[in-house]
């Protein structure tokens, strides 16, 4: 077994056993200890008969590799605890994918007094956020430890070099008490292919000094170990500063260390007590990033697990836990995002010490450009003081991209003759949307798909040809709003499709029916994709806005020259009597919907009514009659009480004031009476007569 350090504690502080004469004392401990599958070490007593779980801050989820991590189980009592059984439950999100290694659970079934074990957990590659709660019962079926959660966090790969390619994950605030567990678990993940040949990861202070008494519990790193690869996880037990409100700055140091085993005994090798002079170190590197660990006393300590959640179009809703590491009860809990596009819901506002509650993360607009934002956690302790912690969410940021090692320089090749035309540059993109869009304000999503796999995040530019933003384009406004002829979206390795949608899709603003155009998608490394689209005429409405159709009489009378009357009222480009009459209706003060344009004058030949439609007075309650396509086929009530002399042209040619263009006394027009049954034909005055108009509501949306 490598990297196994047996500890004893004197006055709350640990020291390494440096005397081989103690081998007989420690042999019994060694027989019960293992590395990553259940390694034991001595911890100080705290007078508590229960076990204590100590969890890492994350169970890392990795691309192309199973994620592994370890949870500590400590027996601080003066007696051994046996017959312990462990289980997982209360899963959220991807928690059902978490597996507890049964060999480690069996090794930790019996824990000696003041000793510890490590349970091993794993999660499949590319698992999204989630978590599970780990429980333990003793041989009597009683709860043997306060249940504790472990959260799955996707860990992104990078291309950083040397020690900067190793990321650290731990709870940044530790609970300190004289009888408590004097260390935390730090998870180191090899996140880059460019760390060099290394087999050792150590935690050092800001001056580069190795922090004393740390121990690798995952049993996969240290002198003599195999080289670490991208995606490997090294779990380190790190002593915390012994006191309240103390700080430890931490950096990562990586190296490759070998052992000269011929000079030491097998027992010394097992105890990891070889002289430092017998270790050869190469490829040493220290990270530029500094992490900070602080201690606190009896208080609340709210931490998110996972601490970073990657929300995408594919997985727009994910889950985690809020963990109160402290012993006091937290109240008035809030968890908020700095981005309005991320909704976070916490299951409760109160959280007891050493307990967890569910947290839900939701990406609202799933087509948002990639970005990362902060999450703030606040809670109030029993003294009324507010405590805070932070986390983060990423929106459409792909954590599963797998980089390749930085290549070594290669000699410049000898020039060769220019080849003839070759194949097209890459596979073609596919563009899909509705084959037709309706003129008006109707939007349709545009989806671009790239052939899998997509190795890197790729920005796709989508354009409309010919560009005519006045008629159609990408936007979100109603008819008449400005639209852009160009839009972008991003395809990811985990989701080779991207969509311009959710109110930001392809819209036809004012295009006329039959207009054709093409949508073109382009991206580096791909052939362009395209699809044709035709603007269709909007379907004809079949009701008066969903209500009863109305008829009203104008408030102003005019002679038979309706064209001149309309021009005087502000009308432009009016050349016919029907155009003039319709304009006067639409702009009359009696119009029930001021400024609305869906009104026609009920004049002979103007087709103002619809066959079979029931019409009402402006109150939409009093029924007037049923239309026949020209006027009314039947009359149930007077059209317009108290209104007489209404132009109708009811006898056709010769009785319409020269098609409503003359106010002369030499021509005549037919009028009706709005307050009698003779609403359509009652008199034939000359066109100098002042008369009103009937105005009929047309079908509209």
Image (cartoon, helix red, strand yellow):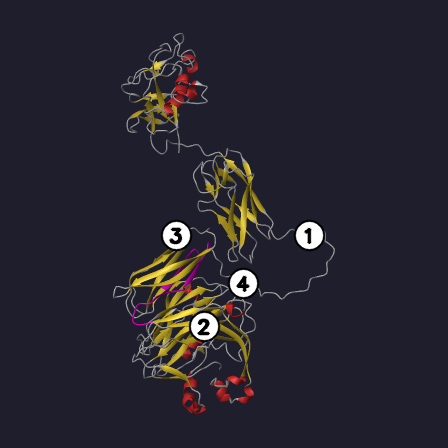
How far apart marks 3 and 2 lie (CA) works out to 37 Å
Q: Is residue 438 magenta?
A: no
Residue tagged 4? 402
| Disc 4 residue crowd, few under 14, some 14–19, many 20+, Cα 10 Å | many
> Of the residues tagged 1 and 3, which is closer to the observer?
3
Whether 311 is among the magenta residues is yes
At 65% across and 51% down in the image, what residue appears? 424
Mark with earlier residue (4, 2):
2
Closer to us: 599 or 23:
23
Earlier sequence position, callout 3 versus callout 2? 2
Indicate the position of residue 177 as horizontal and vertical percent values: 32, 76
Q: Position of residue 108 (x, y in %)?
A: 40, 79
Give the mark, 4 or 3, whose residue is nearer the N terminus.
3
Q: Which mark is residue 340?
A: 3
Q: Which residues are magenta?
A: 296-321
Where does residue 385 sit, x and y in percent of width and height?
28, 64
Of residues 204 and 83, the one drawn nearer to the viewer in this rendering: 204
Dot 1: element: loop
Kindly indicate whether the residue at mark 3 contacts the one at mark 4 (C-beta within 8 angstroms): no
Residue that carries the numbered disc 1 in the rendered image = 422
Up/down of 136 relative to 460, above or below: below
């Amino acid at each position: 077994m490598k990297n196994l350090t047996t500890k004893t504690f004197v006055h709350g502080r640990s020291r390494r056993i440096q005397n081989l004469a103690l081998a007989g004392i420690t042999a019994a401990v060694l027989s019960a200890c293992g590395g990553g599958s259940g390694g034991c070490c001595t911890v100080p007593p705290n007078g508590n008969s229960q076990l204590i779980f100590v969890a890492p801050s994350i169970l890392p989820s990795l691309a192309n590799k199973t994620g592994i991590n370890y949870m500590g189980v400590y027996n601080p009592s003066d007696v051994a605890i046996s017959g312990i059984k462990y289980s997982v439950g209360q899963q959220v999100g991807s928690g059902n994918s978490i597996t507890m290694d049964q060999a480690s659970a069996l090794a930790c079934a019996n824990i000696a007094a003041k000793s510890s074990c490590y349970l091993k957990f794993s999660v499949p590659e590319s698992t999204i956020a989630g978590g599970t709660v780990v429980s333990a019962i003793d041989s009597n079926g009683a709860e043997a430890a306060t249940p504790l959660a472990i959260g799955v966090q996707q860990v992104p790969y990078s291309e950083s070099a040397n020690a900067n390619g190793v990321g650290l994950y731990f709870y940044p605030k530790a609970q300190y008490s004289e009888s408590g567990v004097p260390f935390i678990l730090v998870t180191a993940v090899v996140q880059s292919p460019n760390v060099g040949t290394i087999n050792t990861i150590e935690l050092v202070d800001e001056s580069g000094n190795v922090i004393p008494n740390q121990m690798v519990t995952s049993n996969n790193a240290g002198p003599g170990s195999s080289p670490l690869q991208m995606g490997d996880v090294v779990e380190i037990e790190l002593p915390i500063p012994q006191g309240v409100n103390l700080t430890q700055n931490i950096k990562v140091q990586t190296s490759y260390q070998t052992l000269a085993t011929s000079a030491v005994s097998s027992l010394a090798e097992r105890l990891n007590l070889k002289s430092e002079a017998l270790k050869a170190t190469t490829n040493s590197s220290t990270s530029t990033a500094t992490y900070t660990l602080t201690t606190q006393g009896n208080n609340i300590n709210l931490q998110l697990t996972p601490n970073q959640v990657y929300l995408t179009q594919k997985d727009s809703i994910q889950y985690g836990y809020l963990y109160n590491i402290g012993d006091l009860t937290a109240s008035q809990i809030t968890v908020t995002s700095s981005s309005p596009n991320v909704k976070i819901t916490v299951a409760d506002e109160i959280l007891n010490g050493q307990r967890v509650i569910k947290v839900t993360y939701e990406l609202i607009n799933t087509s948002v450009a990639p970005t990362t934002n902060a999450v703030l956690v606040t809670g109030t302790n029993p003294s009324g003081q507010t405590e805070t912690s932070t986390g983060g969410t990423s929106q459409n940021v792909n954590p599963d991209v797998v980089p390749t090692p930085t290549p070594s320089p290669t000699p410049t090749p000898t020039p060769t003759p220019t080849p003839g035309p070759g194949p097209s540059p890459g596979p073609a993109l596919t563009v899909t949307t509705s084959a037709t869009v309706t003129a008006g304000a109707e939007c349709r999503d545009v989806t671009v798909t790239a052939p899998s796999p997509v190795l890197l995040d790729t920005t796709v530019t989508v354009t409309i040809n010919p560009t005519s933003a006045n008629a159609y384009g990408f936007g979100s406004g109603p008819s008449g709003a400005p639209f852009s002829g160009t839009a972008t979206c991003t395809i990811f390795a985990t989701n080779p499709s991207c969509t311009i949608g959710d109110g930001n899709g392809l819209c036809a603003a004012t295009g006329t029916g039959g207009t054709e155009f093409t949508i073109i998608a382009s991206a580096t490394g791909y052939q362009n994709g395209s699809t044709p689209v035709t603007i269709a005429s909007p379907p004809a409405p079949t009701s008066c806005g969903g209500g009863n159709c109305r008829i009203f009489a104008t408030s102003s009378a005019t002679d038979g020259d309706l064209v001149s009357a309309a021009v005087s009222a502000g009308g432009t480009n009016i050349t016919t009597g029907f155009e003039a009459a319709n304009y006067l209706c639409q702009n009359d003060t009696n119009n029930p919907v001021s400024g609305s344009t869906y009104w026609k004058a009920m004049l002979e030949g103007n087709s103002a009514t619809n066959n079979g439609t029931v019409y009402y007075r402006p109150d939409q309650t009093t029924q007037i009659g049923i239309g026949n396509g020209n006027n009314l086929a039947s009359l149930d009530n007077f059209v317009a009480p108290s209104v007489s002399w209404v132009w109708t042209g009811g006898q056709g040619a010769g009785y319409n004031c020269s098609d409503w263009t003359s106010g002369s006394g030499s021509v005549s027009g037919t009028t009706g009476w709005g307050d009698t049954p003779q609403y359509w034909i009652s008199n034939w005055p000359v066109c100098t007569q002042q008369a009103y108009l009937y105005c009929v509501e047309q079908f509209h949306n």
